[in-house]
């Protein structure tokens, strides 16, 4: 199922690959509701627990690392959770270009990489311009 989930666009697939593809319409990603979004979900602990506690609420996770997308998808499948969509892509590009204004109930960002070296500042997620898009 993992290969099918990431293999291409389809409404029923829980993972949207936006790393090398154009952004689809917002309602294709989240068909209904105002989701809670976690950026950089890692191994998916928050997404899995929150979605289990609130099965009637949509959740969306954005992660740049394929390994973490795979791990989280396996947990979602194991617990038969259907109210979560995952985006495999760069949050700094997706939030500004793909998500419409007032389309999100809440954003969660836990433990972002600080990229302390000056040469790595361009990799930081939480910049003033990114926060302005939230």
Image (cartoon, rainbow, N blue to C red):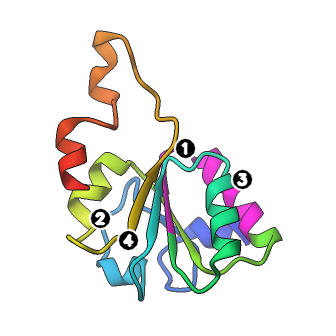
Residue 71: image tag: 3
Picture quarter with the C terminus: bottom left
Q: CA distance from mark 4 to mark 3?
A: 25 Å
> Badge 4: few (under 14), some or many (20 or more) residues near its Cα, within 10 Å?
few
Q: CA distance from mark 4 to mark 1?
A: 24 Å
Q: Nearer the viewer, mark 4 or mark 1?
A: 4
Q: Quadrant of residue 120?
A: top left
Q: CA distance from mark 2 to mark 3?
A: 24 Å
Mark 2 / mark 3, whichever is N-terminal: 2
In this view of the protein, which residue sits in the foreground, 22 or 54?
A: 54
Above or below 40: residue 83: below
In this view of the protein, which residue sits in the foreground, 40 or 57?
A: 57
> Badge 3: few (under 14), some or many (20 or more) residues near its Cα, within 10 Å?
few
- Identify the residue under disc 4: 105
Q: Which residues are magenta?
A: 60-76
- Identify the residue under disc 1: 65
| Residue 38 x, y percent position in the rendering | 48, 56
Residue occupying the point 22% across, 57% down: 96
Disc 2 vs disc 3: Cβ atoms closer than 8 Å? no
Specify the farthest residue to the right.
Answer: 78
């Amino acid at each position: 199922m993992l290969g099918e989930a990431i293999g291409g666009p389809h409404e029923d697939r829980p993972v949207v690959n936006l790393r090398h593809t154009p952004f689809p319409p917002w309602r294709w990603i989240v068909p209904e509701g105002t989701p809670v979004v976690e950026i950089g979900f890692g191994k998916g602990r928050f997404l899995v627990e929150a979605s289990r506690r609130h099965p009637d609420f949509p959740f969306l996770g954005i992660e740049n690392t394929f390994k973490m997308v795979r791990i989280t998808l396996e947990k979602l499948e194991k617990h038969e959770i259907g109210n979560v969509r995952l985006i495999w892509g760069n949050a700094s590009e997706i939030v500004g270009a793909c998500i419409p204004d007032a389309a999100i109930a809440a954003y969660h960002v836990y433990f972002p990489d600080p990229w302390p070296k000056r040469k790595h500042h361009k990799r930081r997620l939480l910049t003033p311009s990114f926060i302005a898009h939230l």
